Image (spheres, rainbow, N blue to C red):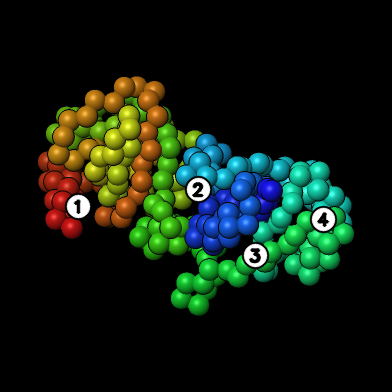
Amino acid sequence: MKSCIVGKFESFHRGHQKLIREAKKLADTVEILSIWPPPGNKNPLFTEREREYLARKFNVQLHNINFEKIKELSPEEFFIFLENCNCNLLVVGVDWKFGKNRSGDVKTAETLGKKYGIKVVSIPPVIENGKKISTSWIKELLENGQIKKANHLLGFNFFVIGISVKGQGIGKTLGFPTVNIETEKILVIPFGVYEVNMEYDGKTFKGIANYGVRPTFKGVNPTLEVHIIGEVLEVKEKSTVKVDFIDFIREERKFKSVEELKKQIKLDVDRILNK
């Protein structure tokens, strides 16, 4: 039997994880039918590659559905679509809406489920401090640099998967060599310095990252660079790396001199090591 979950699934946060856990109790296979890309969202929290990583992490199948293909379907037509997807069991949140103009709800789904042989199971949301966990709330926290709170709602660390690229070597001249990382998305975090973990070649390294335009050196384009703390790491160009954001250290700012910047980086590293 296959259990299906329908939704945007932009972030796989703790509310999504609850749906996955319940679906796994009821069926051998769980498939996420994800409305993707999310309607009206030009900069999703996670890229397609990152969402595939999360699907593997939670041991589910991820099947993207283009919103344009289903937005005109009536609730009944949508259930016919689910039937054609071989969905035997549908797990949704209690406040789920579906069909054209969001005209169907859980009661509609239960009625249509009986007609089309699809069992519908509704699950209460995960509540944190009296509020339903949502991707929009997580984004708001990240935009304000509240990394730890966002990670708590996600149930894992906010991360980016990127490719190592050749930099200008500025970090090396400062005594803090960095891995320069090209990302597929604009990070929804403030320009600043972060405590991070970086995964490379099957190993995890503690690091400090700067995300921003490097104003001391008159940079323009946002860049992400990571210094590995306590060891020398040679990362080959065009290698895949994953950066987990653990905590926000400080905002990016312009320093009067290179020496002042070096002193501040040392303070930042010490702060991470002494936490």
The image position of residue 16, as x and y in percent, is 56, 58
Mark 4 or 2: in front is 4
| 65 vs 150: above or below | above
CA gap, disc 3 and disc 2 = 18 Å
Q: Find the distance from the CA under tag 2 to the CA under tag 1.
A: 30 Å
Q: Nearer the viewer, mark 4 or mark 3?
A: 4
Q: Is residue 41 in view from this perspective?
A: no
Residue behind mark 4:
117
Residue at (37, 57) in percent of width and height: 147
Residue 114 position within the rendered picture, expressed as x and y whole percent measured from the top left: 83, 62
Q: How many angstroms separate mark 4 from mark 1 (CA)?
A: 55 Å
In which image quadrant can residue 275 be found? bottom left
Residue bearing the label numbered 1: 272
In the rendered structure, the answer to whether residue 25 lies left or right of residue 144 reads right
Q: Quadrant of residue 170?
A: top left
Pick whichever of labels 3 and 2 is earlier in the sequence: 2
* Residue 93, numbered label: 3
**Is residue 77 found left or right of 17 in the rendered image?**
right
Return the residue at label 2.
58
Q: Amino acid at mark 4?
A: Gly
Question: Is tag 4's residue or tag 2's residue first in the polypeptide sequence?
Answer: 2
Q: Position of residue 87 (x, y in %)?
A: 74, 49
Q: CA distance from mark 1 to mark 3?
A: 39 Å
Q: Residue at x 33, y 32 (%)?
A: 202
The amino acid pointed to by label 3 is: Gly
Amino acid at pointer 2: Phe
